[in-house]
Image (cartoon, rainbow, N blue to C red):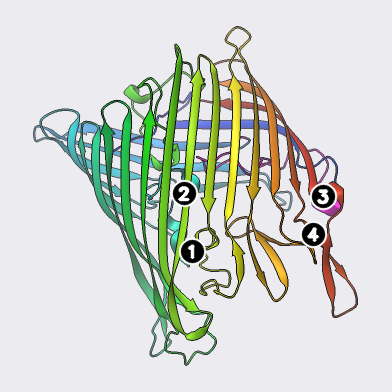
Amino acid sequence: MTLLFALPAAAGDFMDVWVTSAFEESNVLAGPDATSPAPNFVERGNATFFENYESRYTDDISQSHLVLYRADEGFVPNWFTEAAFVLRFAPYLDPDQTDPGVDISDDGSYVRIGRHLGGEDTSLSFTGYAVDANRFRLGYSYDLTWGGRDIYSFDPSAAPGVRLQLDVRTFYAFVGMKTAVGDYADPDTGVVRNQAYYGGLAGLGGQVGDHLRLEGGAGNFQQGQLTNVADVTSAIYNAPIFAAGACAQVAVRTTSDLAFIASNELKLYRNAPDFLSDTYLVHRHLDGTGLLVSAEANLLSHNLIDPANVDSTVVEKAWAGDVQALLVHGSSELAVDGVYKDLPYILFNVPGITSGYAVSENMVTSPQLYVRGRAAHHFEGPRLTPSAGVGWMRPATYSTEGTAYVQYTATDKGHVPAGQQPTAILSAVAGLQWDVSKSVVAVGEVLYTLDNNRSDFVAEDEDAGAYVLAAAEERNELGFNLMVRARF
């Protein structure tokens, strides 16, 4: 099992601490009428659509993890145990909140029992996620992963799970399950009770020599119930939603000095001396040139209400994948990625455009497709790292009743201006990072996004109105971030 590369804490058992002071503006061209206040130290999350692809968080957060960790050799030879109590602390900076506060949540507390099988690099282990198994997911690039707590159509208070894994040198195989408890309405009586919902996950993978890595996985989940039916007397009222999927990834590299890409959001926290470092600063460097290319594919499906016959269901399929390429030469790096997500994949956890309904075959839709590139170079002497990135996106869209919509994320969509077809989105970011010490950096960034799909609603009378093209200063977003960030 892969484990999170942890960072040393200066006090107690708090680790992976981020403290960020940031002066930001999401759009200097627009004002509060366009939901863009003046530059301030309060708002966070100012980023282009293609950043933070492998993370749940933007780089301007303040947060910490309390990790109480214990590892022991078992009383029986070759057996071992480890456990961690992991809490995430995140102060929130909400301008609508009258009092300051801190969000506290479990972030993967676990207990693990294992046995070495003929060597330190061969073992069989059982991991129990005590409260939240959200780090136990399927898929590889974090933005495409699935099977976390958000796959349930309800909001579970907890979603623990277990994982049984075999590690043989560079090969692994696992099976696991997770559960959540939510409302369950009896299809016959309509009486609502608590019910357990199950999910099963399995996968395997490993390296073939030093240059090739192959991985695959599959899962099945009880996602929820169909409640949003036209008539409560329908035969499918409160019918279960079953979700299933499969994923695969292949990665090739020209040198073993270039590490395969893996998101830290999918790893366990481990607070042990052998996994600690005296700095979080990471700048890729190779003596020569190295190339890493990886490709991932995900196929999901679930049964939803058939829009053509609302008294029956249809199996809706969802696709997503990416191709990533990373070229490193000395202290310079160039990354180019292509990402594909169809509309059902983006909406899979909702599930559907209208909750519980499959996308109609009569509806005109298009998938999300984007490419992004980033270049950076680290100057060792002055400890400066300039970088620049650009991304082009054809957003996922659908049209209904003469109105076109852009579906940015599962919960964020917008009306396309009346009489206009959806258009591509262009974003760019340029930044400079100065490494002040092993724990503190100063960062300056300029961000730009052109989105001609943005619209404003204009009322024509008391009963009608139209979505018109937003003003130029709203469609052209020019922002900046000035940050001093500590991580230790």
Q: Which residue is mark 3?
A: 474
Q: Amino acid at mark 4?
A: Ser
Where residue 481 appears, as percent x and y from the top left, is 72, 33
Earlier-in-chain disc, 4 versus 3: 4
Marks 4 and 1, Cα distance to the nearest angstrom?
Answer: 31 Å
Q: Amino acid at mark 3?
A: Glu
Residue at position x 77%, y 38% in the image:
479
Q: Amino acid at mark 2?
A: Gly
Residue at position x 45%, y 43% in the image:
141
Q: Which residue is mark 4?
A: 455
Mark 4 and mark 1 residues within 8 Å of each other at the beta carbon: no
Q: Please tell me which residue lies in front, 328 or 470.
A: 328
From what the image shows, is residue 119 above or below residue 129? Answer: above
Q: Please tell me which residue lies in front, 147 or 287.
A: 287
Where residue 452 appears, as percent x and y from the top left, is 77, 52
Q: Is residue 97 visible?
A: yes
Label 3: state its secondary structure: helix
Depth check, mark 2 against mark 1: the one in front is: 2
Where residue 280 appears, as percent x and y from the top left, is 50, 23
Label 1: state its secondary structure: loop
